[in-house]
Amino acid sequence: MKIEVVSQNKNPLLKRSEVMLKADHSGKPTPSRYDLLQEISKTLKASQETIIIERIITKAGAGTSEIKVHVYNRPEDIPKHKLEKMKRRTKAPQKQEEAKEEQSEETGSSEEQKPEEKPAEGEEKKEEGGQEQ
């Protein structure tokens, strides 16, 4: 995967640089945020902790993506909500699988749950009729 800088603007008020990148991933699907983060940090020579990937735009059939990135001066400058969202989105592939397993355990996996029985059509109509009166 090849990444090149299209434009770069400094925003001193928000203590960040706003960067537009172009990633060439011909013949492959759109790269994950985890993979992009690693490549972007190498290209921009910035710490992964200070990079927030805002948006990835890939047109159908094209082997390129436009990526909007914010590079903050320090990790402390990143707004908390953006940092939390970025952490959720850029988990390592193994950690993503573990998180899905944990989530299914918390809610109960679909195999363990029995589908709810639907009341017969006549019963639904009676209930609706009772509510209208």
Image (cartoon, rainbow, N blue to C red):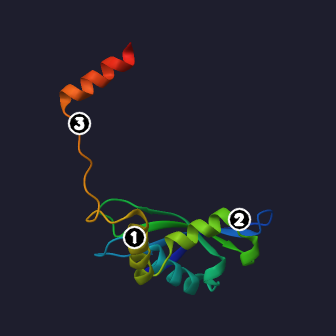
Residue beneath disc 1: 105
> Residue 47 or 19: which is nearer the viewer?
47
Instruction: State if disc 3 and disc 2 touch (CB < 8 Å).
Output: no
Q: Amino acid at mark 1?
A: Glu
Res. 100 image quadrant: bottom left
Q: Determine whether 124 is above or below 51 in the image.
A: above
Residue 99 in percent (x, y) is at 44, 74
Residue 18 in percent (x, y) is at 65, 66
Cα–Cα gap, marks 2 and 3: 49 Å
Q: Secondary structure at mark 2?
A: loop
Quarter of the picture holding the N terminus:
bottom left
Label 3 or label 1, whichever comes before in sequence order: 1
Q: Determine whether 82 is above or below 46 in the image.
A: above
Instruction: State if disc 1 and disc 3 touch (CB < 8 Å).
Output: no
Residue beneath disc 2: 79
Residue 96 in percent (x, y) is at 42, 76
Residue 88 in percent (x, y) is at 53, 70
> Residue 130 or 102: which is nearer the viewer?
130
> Residue 21 or 121: which is nearer the viewer?
121
Label 1 or label 2, whichever comes before in sequence order: 2
Quarter of the picture holding the C terminus:
top left
Q: Is residue 124 visible?
A: yes
Cα–Cα gap, marks 1 and 2: 31 Å
Q: Secondary structure at mark 3?
A: loop
Residue beneath disc 3: 119
